[in-house]
Amino acid sequence: MSNVATRFAPSPTGALHIGGVRTALFCWLYSKNKKGTFHLRIEDTDKERSKDEHKDQIIKSLKWIGIEHDGELYIQSTKINDHIDVANDLLKNGHAYKCYCSTEEIEDQKKRAKQKKLPYTYNRKCRELSESDVPKDIKPVVRFKSKIEGSSILKDLVQGDVEIDNITIEDFIILRNDGTPTYNLSATVDDHQMNMTHIIRGDDHKINTFKQIQIYLLMKWNLPYFAHIPLIHTLEGKKLSKRDNASTLDDYSKIGIMPDALRNYLLRLGWSYKDKEIFTIKESIEHFNLEGIGKSPSKLDMSRILSMNEHYIKSISEDELINHIIKYCELYKEKIPVEKVDKIKQSLIFLKNKAKTLEDIYNNAKYIIFDEVSFNQDDLKLIDDRAKKIISEFSNKVNDLKVFNKETLEPVVNNLIKTHETNFKGVGQPLRIALTGSKFGPGIYDIIISLGNDETLKRLNKII
RNA sequence: GGUCCCUUCGUCUAUCGGUUAGGACAGCUGGUUUUCAUCCUGCAAAGGGGGGUUCGAUUCCCCCAGGGACCGCCA
């Protein structure tokens, strides 16, 4: 067989969600593992619902997480004439037929089937229609003559052999009454024309595969391999859908999840390689295989995403981290002034210890970013007269200090604890609030040192 | 309702007939720490149920139960 070629084929009828991203990831990884190519096809034949903004969002999302397609972007709508040609071919050879049943008629049958609790399949009424019975005033749809006898087996690379009675596949429509092709036809023709060797997609397409295989066979095309990966479920156990809230990449990006962390999380959702949890992109390409894909659906777990992100925050270099933070703040918060960047970078060493997301880092670095302290009003109430006195004494003593570091600062604090008969909290908390506006935050010495002599005294004196 | 798929700790998973059923996240202890964290100890936590096959089943087979997907002139 020629080089492995996979594709991801979303429809731009909504934002790409995290489930789609994982499918794309698996397709991409598989092709790269095999030194093959990965293609992106936009299935935009639903003119009503397809939007350019969604198409752009899809491409942007994939790029964000590190996936780029090989070759030209394939736009399905530009190929519909090829799809129609195939439909006419099928028609000519007697593998498809025109169906004149009205929508009302079909709806009625469906309704009655439902009432009687019987399974509905189209009754094939027009399958053997003679010329003379053809109504003149109705625009027909074209249906595929699906096999009635026997059964078919799908040799799925993930699911194993799946057998189904052919009778359960109805004579599906391949051309609408306006002459446009439908999904099963278009996808099949495109996959063939794009020379796809492996169709890796969500489990929800499994039954479609039985329809598509029949087209391949009748057209005498090479059958690609199929792999249907289990779907990602919500916490409630339902299929992730476009209507589900909070599941696009942007939703994760804006709370400060980094692409590599999400990529790593998604990789391990439904796939495993021994006990390995952390994979660089290179490692994931090296180890990815279809055998490692599980058969059961998996649930999205935010705490795992967070902890993966935390891992990446702690393990990437400070240069990389600061770049992420700069980009993140510019995009979702406010641009960090250039003169503050170095200061934040120097503070990363303690800032990253208490962060699961870039947003956490931003929040804890606010006291550096803004010259003006914005106080948490509840915390501000903790600054009573006694606290002010402590702050004032601290300020005086620190004023004389030549060097600002933990060794010089610590004795001052300890002294205050003793003279005011309090504990560390009694001294540290007022100082932290005065300096950062909040009782939560980095260690007090870290704050003071990162702020520097002048700024520290300025802020302390302001509150007394 | 029909067809198909799935079922190991709360979650993601390892195990490819013989293990004290392993790891990770979350949870809970304890320790380090000058708040909160980080870091380090430790603990608790799982094979849906019933039949087979086998010397031996989480693992193979069957049945049941539960869950899911599909059943559009959407993709």
Image (cartoon, coloured by chain):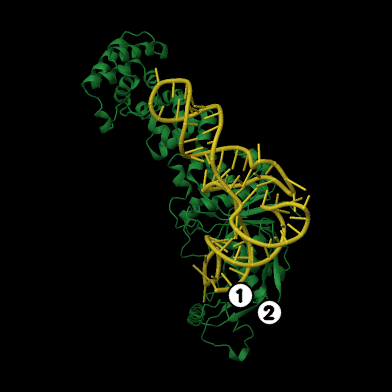
Chain colours: A green, B yellow
* Left or right placement of residue A452 versus residue B70 in this view: left
Disc 2 versus disc 1: nearer the observer: 1
- Mark 2, residues whose alpha carbon is within 10 Å: few (<14), some, or many (≥20)? few
Give the label on residue A170, or none.
1
Give the label on residue A129, or none.
none
Residue A71, visible in the rendered structure: no
Which residue is pictured at 44% across the width and 58% down the height? A243
Q: Is residue A101 above or below residue A87?
A: below
Question: Which residue in the rendered view is the most extreme toward the left?
Answer: A385
Q: Assign the N terminus of chain A to one quadrant of the image.
A: bottom right
Q: Nearer the viewer, residue B52 or A88?
A: B52
Q: Is residue A336 above or below residue A182?
A: above
Query: Residue A82 at x, y = what percent?
Result: 63, 67
The secondary element bearing badge 1 is classed as: loop
Q: Nearer the viewer, residue A81 or A160?
A: A160
In which image quadrant can residue A446 be found? top left
Q: Is residue B72 above or below residue B48?
A: below
Q: Nearer the viewer, residue A379 or B63?
A: B63
Q: What chain does mark 2 sit on? A: A
The reply to whether label 2 and label 1 mark residues of one chain is yes
Question: Which residue in the rendered view is the most extreme toward the bottom?
Answer: A132
Give the label on residue A94, or none.
2
Q: Nearer the viewer, residue A295 or A146?
A: A295
In which image quadrant can residue A265 be found? top right
Residue type marked 2 = Gly
Residue A31, visible in the rendered structure: yes
Q: What chain does mark 1 sit on? A: A
The secondary element bearing badge 2 is classed as: loop
Residue type marked 1 = Glu
